[in-house]
Image (cartoon, helix red, strand yellow):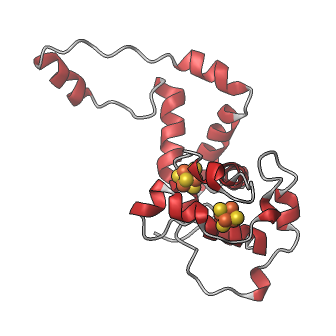
Amino acid sequence: MAENASTTRDTTKDPIKASELDPKFKYKLIKRHGSEKLLKCFQCGTCTSDCPIARYSDSYRPRTLIHMARLGLKDRVLKSDTLWLCAACFTCTDRCPQDVEVASVIRVLRNMAAEEGIVPQVFKDQCASVLETGYAYKIPDLRLKKRETLGLPPLPKGNPESVKKSLKGVNFVNYVKNQGETDAKQ
Ligand code: SF4
Ligand code: SF4
């Protein structure tokens, strides 16, 4: 599949070119709620060593994402698929000796990526499913029938209208709609 503007991949190990550096990026980041202390990071690695996802992933390293963001590797960090592996457990935030809110910085970076339409397809599909069915995953008819044959009670109906109402305030509905239109053009 050809790479497009919204494609994510593991960008953390590519050689760095000077032309990639955006010196203003870190200053944009520290204006966002949750990223204010980013510049206090002194790269000790505590966030990575305590991260439960880094323990099981060859590529996910919160320290690396923080370092890339500080260096100004904006495109690379926003297009990194590892950005989306964080489980938001906040262990890193609790343990950072410099009080960097690592999990919040990652949330801010994800929000910035989403604002630029850079979101892995699996999450786009989940967003669309939440709006359509009230569930993050569409439950196949086959599985529903299987429940019946096993004598299990029917699953509660999702309430997509209520979900849409709740998510209007955070612009989620527009985001999913715009993404659908963008994807259809590609
Ligand atoms: S624990 Fe804090 S200071 Fe250490 S690398 Fe992570 S963000 Fe930086
Ligand atoms: S919040 Fe994310 S980066 Fe921090 S320890 Fe948990 S999974 Fe790792």
Q: Position of residue 185 (x, y in %)?
A: 60, 54
Q: Which residue is drawn at 48% across and 33% down?
A: 129
Q: Where is residue 171 in the image (x, y as percent from the top left)?
A: 73, 34
Q: In which quarter of the image is residue 28?
A: bottom right
Which residue is situated farthest in the front direction here? 97
Q: In which quarter of the image is the N terminus?
A: bottom left
Q: Between residue 122 and residue 111, name the one nearer to us.
A: 111
Q: Can residue 81 be seen from the camera position used here?
A: no
Q: Which residue is drawn at 75% across and 59% down?
A: 98
Q: Between residue 39 and residue 153, name the one nearer to us.
A: 39
Q: Quadrant of residue 72?
A: bottom right
> How many labels, in total?
0
Q: Where is residue 182 in the image (x, y as percent from the top left)?
A: 63, 51
Q: Can residue 124 be seen from the camera position used here?
A: yes
Q: In which quarter of the image is residue 146?
A: top left
Q: Between residue 158 and residue 87, name the one nearer to us.
A: 87
Q: Quadrant of the C terminus?
A: bottom right
Quick check: 97 above or below 91?
A: below
Ligand 1 located in image quadrant: bottom right
Q: In this view, does 17 lie to the left or right of 4?
A: right
Q: Position of residue 104 (x, y in %)?
A: 69, 48
Q: Which residue is drawn at 62% across and 70% down?
A: 64
Quick check: 73 above or below 125?
A: below
Quick check: 81 above or below 115?
A: below
Q: In this view, does 105 lie to the left or right of 183?
A: right
Q: Which residue is drawn at 66% across and 32% down?
A: 173
